[in-house]
Amino acid sequence: MTLLLILGMGIITFLFRFTPLLIRKKSEPRQKESRLLDNLPLAVLSALIIPGIFQVDAETPRVGFVAGIVAVVMLLVKKVPLYGVIVISVLAAVIVKLIYLF
Amino acid sequence: MANNVEQLKRGFLDSVPIVIGYIPASFTFGLVGKTLSLGNWEVFLLSALVYAGASQFIGAKLLAAGTAAPIILLLTLIINLRYFFISISFSRRLNRDTRPIFKGLIGFGLTEEVYAVSMMSEKNRRQVGKQSIPYLLGLVFPPYAVTLIATYAGILLAGYIPISILPALNTSLYVLLIALIIPQLRGSNRNIAISISSAVSSWLLDPYLGTSTVLVAMIIGAFVGNLIPTQEEKTGSDVI
């Protein structure tokens, strides 16, 4: 029973992701709804980051906060490769967490 | 043919940051699922069939609480509706003549992170055209594979691992998203407006809307962006 339910959840999720890919109509590039779609990637990502990053570690929101700040500073100040940004920010988060634990 | 292999490789390379993020996230999911006293198969199948990050956690919690099936399905519908918009936006990057089987595979793997990388990574940003199928398959497959492996590892090792350090590792997913949006904000008032308005509305609405916050916030952000003229629409003389 539970397995059927999980399958149902999977089908719903899949249909949301799959159905729009089947549309074959050509969209006019300068139309208003097309401009809204241009804005969508940035809007989704921004909404996902905040407040999500503060909730990664519900007990110590500072962990996510520090990782975010370190990442933003690295991206703004100096050209660090993506892997470097991720590794250093996560290390900063781990260090903050360890300080809180001990 | 050689070009296809090249594209596939490029997809694999671009998927590495996503893979790095999904390992701790899926591992945590395996652990948390077991902690909620769900069966091994239930935890694994949530990763394998639903494959949708945060909504998997919510699904696991609802299942463990014995919530009625129609309510779980309704909540899945609401929480995952955002993928519908993500997919509409993504569909313009996909060649319309793509075979349905490939559309199915790519659609199945179209998580937020995959979407973000395919729309925004530095190499693709200037490219208005379509993404090639080998590239997208290369981008989609590794994150799914590590999700399965790491979920399984989490299920097996539940009970042996101190769970307290894992959240800190999961910040990597958010750092990836930040790294993808910051370059977009340079020199574009419109993009800054989109980003700030959707982030702020998501922050403010989160306590009230809970899981459907992202959906509402992204629509607000997209509309606010439309209020700001783009660079081409301006005369160019009003640079301060």
Image (spheres, coloured by chain):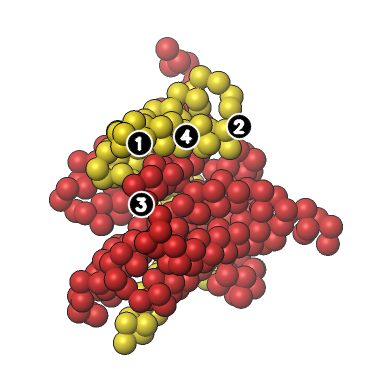
Chain colours: A yellow, B red
Residue at figure coordinates x 20%, y 41% from the top left: B204
The reply to the same-chain question for discs 4 and 3 is no
The answer for which chain carries disc 3 is: B
At label 1, which amino acid type do we have? Answer: Lys
- Report the residue marked by disc 4: A91
- Pointer 4 and pointer 3: residues touching (CB < 8 Å)? no
Instruction: Point out the tag, 2 or 1, that comes first from the N-terminus.
Output: 2
Q: Left of B77 or right of it: where is B178?
A: right
Any part of residue A45 in sight:
no
Q: Secondary structure at mark 1?
A: helix
Q: Tell me if I can see residue B11 in this picture.
A: yes
Please report, as a chain letter, where disc 2 is located: A
Point out which mark residue B163 bears. Answer: 3
Closest to the camera, between mark 2 and mark 1, is 1
Where does label 1 land, which residue?
A97
Distance, label 2 to label 1, CA atoms, is: 25 Å
